[in-house]
Amino acid sequence: MSIETMELLQIVGKKHLMNKVMRAAVINGNIHFIDAMDEINTNRVKIEDDSDNFDSLIEQTTLRRYSEHKNYADDEELVKSLTKMFLIENKIYDQYVKLDYNYEKIIGRLFHAKTTVQPVFEKAELVEQEIALRKQRIQNFNYLTTLDADLDGFLNMKEIKVAVIIISKENYKKLKMNYENIPAIVLHINDEKDNVVLLTATIESLHEDYLRVFESLNYTKVDIPTGYTGTASQVIRQINGEIEALEAELSEIRNSIKGFYENYNDLIRQAVTVLEIEKKAELIRKTSAVGRSLFCVYGFIPKAKSSEFKAYIANSFGMEVSVTIDDVSDRKTGVTPPSKINTNRFCKPFGFMIRMYGTPSYNELDPTPFFTFSYMLLFGAMFGDLGQGLVILLGGLFIIYKMKQEEFGGILVRLGLSSCLFGLIYGSVFGDEEIIHPLILRPMDNIMTVLIYAIILGFILLSIAYIYGMLNFRRRKDIEEGLLSKEGLTGFLFFLVFGLLVANVAYKFADIPVYVFLIVLFVLLMITVFKQPLANMIKKKEELYDEPKVDYFLEAGFGSIETILSVLSNFISFIRVGAFALNHVGLYLAFAAMAGMFEHRLGNVAMLIIGNVLIIGLEGLIVFIQSMRLEYYELFSKYYTGEGIEYEPVKLNK
């Protein structure tokens, strides 16, 4: 579990090979590209003065930002339309992932393919629409099968308007109660679930009154097309014949489409793949610098992958493209290397919660292991219950395997395990403390002990956080913050001495006067106040202050007050761990008391189930948030900045 070591990659090559080199970088998929001109302007370009790099030395002064950008929107629309026509999955096909291809030729052939097949697909679509239309007509004529009459005769009368409508059965009851006020003849001809189908007839002069009445009944008019003769059953047979003819025509069209599929299947898959490669390559081109005959790109690549990529470029392009790899361990100017975190499977889900705060910096330790351990510990201590923890665990598994959300589901699985473990420690199963014996203690029987344990837990976690922070300062070679700041060694000693003072006052474990502790605390506090001049003396700088003295000491004075308040709040904040452990038991007791008010066993059980659901849902959420608060505000402030750059290599998403 660490942040992977990066190296700075410089690629310089002949301009006519630029597209192929970009494709190679995309296919490699390990390079996090940065703006070439920004890097060049830092004057940190490392180029050996030999014949292989002589051209690049000459052209450095003529390099300019690449500006010939291409829009792939039309090509995307073309590819999308054909994949939709032939039902081809829009994904990367490995057999077409290669450097050598003519993109323009592939797109040209694809355009020709579309002009060839599109009329056939459009014709098939029209035939399918005609079939669907006739099937709808059959459904509508089915409403009239109870009428043994020639439809053309009464549906097309000149003076009388005939219509087939559908209304709800409830509205039909209202209609029947007011038949004498209806300006139409109404005949009930069919039923459809909660609706009735009516045949209505009215004269032209009463048509507006007819509409007013039936609109109030929220009616739906059934479309009965003209042009058919005979009874409804005869018309349905005619339409079925039309459908058979259309389906035969559609079958012929689909057979021709199968032939097109065989001709263009490979072309479309190739186009899908190369389009994605070109789009990714364009992202790299946007970061590049170009001269009269050369191009130049920069990026960060994991050290473990750099030699392999360099050899790949050498084998593919020979002397026309050079790759220079530079160490970034002492990098002080230019873009900060991105952070690629290698985390084991158990800790990986908690990376989601760390990213919510920020990305780890390249030159600091991976916070994921400590965050995973401490978060599980805090949650379990506050929400310790074997039964409820098992429910959370099962909920996490459901989210992983059914909802396919591995990060959040993985977090719940691990929190459920922690809750189960502390449930065994507390002897709690679904809030009941009579089912099993506790491994260590019952919270409600040992209230003061639980609160003291919570402070001790906080003391241990904060100590680890301080050590993490000091290691990070050491990696950054920051003497001032690492040794003399309130988050460094001096702050850690202040925290330890303050803790010893509180413990000695409470338990008198050593015969040391209080004023001795206070003197040590004062000295340590003064060191944090004078950290800058002391650090500059250690570094043997002439100037002891990097800013005006008044400004510095004003800020340092407030900083010393913040140091005292921070240590106090750190200790007090962790009392909530014990408080929530007690609160968890108290909530169950409240629901148990309400359950006892029911005379029947069923009501008693129902109340306990409701209580457990509310405890898991509401209290579980609160404990989840409170654990996060302790991590973000109490622990992260000691060792984690979250100001890194996320490692985002340009690669194909397979």
Image (cartoon, rainbow, N blue to C red):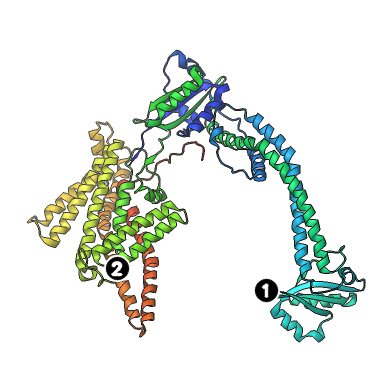
Q: Which amino acid does label 2 sit on?
A: Val
Relative depth, front residue between 249 and 388: 249
Residue under label 1, please give it.
Answer: 193
**Residue 27: x %, y % from top left:** 50, 32
Write the residue at 15% across / 56% down: 501
Rendered view: 531 above or below 541:
below
Residue under label 2, please give it.
Answer: 429
Relative depth, front residue between 635 and 559: 635
**Residue 239: x %, y % from top left:** 80, 60
Q: Which mark's residue is nearer the viewer, 1 or 2?
A: 1
Could you tell me how far apart the alpha carbons at marks 1 and 2 are, in whole angstroms?
Answer: 50 Å
- Left or right position of 110 against 65: right
Picture quarter with the N terminus: top left
Q: What residue type is labelled 1?
A: Lys
**Residue that protrudes farthest toward the left in the picture:** 511
Q: Under tag 1, what secondary structure? A: loop
Write the residue at 20% across / 68% down: 446
Q: How crowded is mark 2: few (under 14 residues within 10 Å), some or many (20 or more)?
A: many
Rendered view: 479 above or below 40:
below
Q: Under tag 2, what secondary structure? A: loop
Residue 14, by quadrant, is top right
**Residue 340: x %, y % from top left:** 39, 39
The disc placed on residue 176 is none
Relative depth, front residue between 40 and 392: 392
Residue 589, by quadrant, is bottom left
For marks 1 and 2, the one nearer the N-term is 1
**Residue that protrudes farthest toward the top in the picture:** 51
